[in-house]
Amino acid sequence: MAKTHKHLWDKVVSLENLMEAARLAMRGKRSLAPAAAFFARWEVECVDLSEELQAGTWRPGAYHYFKIHEPKERIVAAAPFRDRVVHHALVRVLEPIIDKRFVEDSFACRKGRGTHAGMRRALEHARRHPWVLKADIRRYFPSIDHEILLGAIGKVVADKRVLELVRLILASHRIWVSPWISIKLLKSKD
């Protein structure tokens, strides 16, 4: 049975965590208007975020959707900068807990891993196995069932306030993430 972690909320909403989260969210984005505006008042913004989170009044803002073509066309959902600070604050607390549960051969977006480590591991497998399966699951991230994801997180995180924050963030653009709803259809209703 996996260890469950309680009493994480105070770590997530602490001023120190939010300030470090803001610094991480600003990395490479200080020249962009939303980040620059936040940075101009970042201590006040972090205090406000901490107070809103503690009071339960923080709500995610509207996402900005845009297309990119690298390496193929896909739609990206960008959260408002202020929300990204909250995301970073949450990840800073949950990542060390959840990362331990990932399979050994998972390399993307993990500290101490990445493309080069993944390539070395792929080479090890290629030397032992003559076959490979290359797969790309279409619209994988938008199709993840939020209840299943929350259930998996709930197996290791027992802090109800943290789980509710995760639920709130996941639900903040849920209508878009359904793989059966066209983004054009949603925009035509605006």
Image (spheres, rainbow, N blue to C red):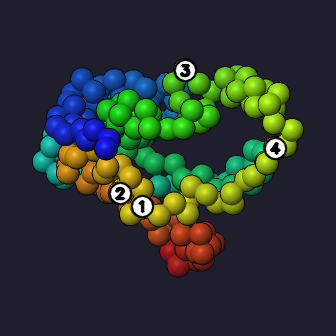
- The picture places residue 171, in percent across and down from the top left corner, at 38, 61
Q: Which mark is residue 132?
A: 4
Q: Is residue 29 visible?
A: yes
Badge 1: few (under 14), some or many (20 or more) residues near its Cα, within 10 Å? few
- Pick the quarter of the image with the N terminus: top left
Seen at 22% across and 31% down, the residue is 11
* CA separation in Å, label 4 and label 1: 29 Å
Q: CA distance from mark 3 to mark 2?
A: 27 Å
Q: Which residue is label 1 attached to?
A: 148
Tell me if label 3 and label 2 are in contact, CB under 8 Å: no
Q: Secondary structure at mark 1?
A: helix
Query: Cα distance, mark 1 to mark 2?
Result: 5 Å
Residue at image x 78%, y 26%?
123
Distance from the alpha carbon under mark 4 to that under mark 3 = 25 Å
Q: Which residue is mark 2?
A: 151
Q: For numbered disc 2, what is the local secondary structure?
A: helix
Which residue type carries mark 3? Gly
Q: Are marks 1 and 2 in contact (CB under 8 Å)?
A: yes
Query: Between disc 2 and disc 4, whose residue precedes?
Result: 4
Of the image marks 4 and 3, the number of the one nearer the N terminus: 3
Where is residue 24 drawn, in percent x and y?
Answer: 43, 26
Amino acid found under the numbered disc labelled 4: Val
* Pointer 2 with pointer 4, Cβ within 8 A: no
